Amino acid sequence: MVEFQYFEGCPNAKETLNNLLSLVEEGFLKKDEIKITKIESPDDAQKLNFQGSPSILYNGIDIYTLEKPSSYAYNCRTYFIDGKLTGVLSKEFIKERIER
């Protein structure tokens, strides 16, 4: 199960979600394997150990840290990938981490 977590207003959520959904179009993932969770409040973030927007979990494991979240953050998330700071997870990064 792949869970996409975000909150409204995060400028990077839509592009990351589009990258994730493109993997469905390519046949890498099935649509019924993806759950989209909108985080409504800091309380929701705490209950779900939300790591920031956008986040993708694969079977409960954060695909960026490769760990099960144990704390929470209610902010826009940034990633350091291939020597660059970004707020968007690329289709290639998502696919590589799920294959791992």
Image (cartoon, rainbow, N blue to C red):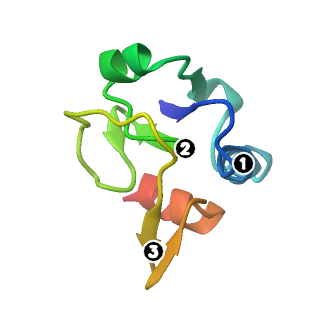
Mark 2 packing: few (<14 Cα in 10 Å), some, or many (20+)?
many
Q: Callout 1, which amino acid?
A: Gly
| Inter-mark Cα distance, 3 to 2 | 15 Å
| Residue at x 23% of width, y 46% of height | 67
Q: Nearer the viewer, mark 1 or mark 3?
A: 3
Q: Callout 2, which amino acid?
A: Pro
Q: Disc 2 vs disc 1: Cβ atoms closer than 8 Å?
A: no
For residue 54, the mark is 2
Q: Position of residue 73 (x, y in %)?
A: 35, 37
- Residue position marked by numbered label 3 in the rendering: 81
Assign a secondary structure to mark 2.
loop
Outermost residue, left side: 70
| Residue at x 42% of width, y 38% of height | 57
| Residue at x 47% of width, y 51% of height | 77
Q: Position of residue 88 (x, y in %)?
A: 60, 60
Q: Callout 3, which amino acid?
A: Ile
- Residue position marked by numbered label 1 in the rendering: 27
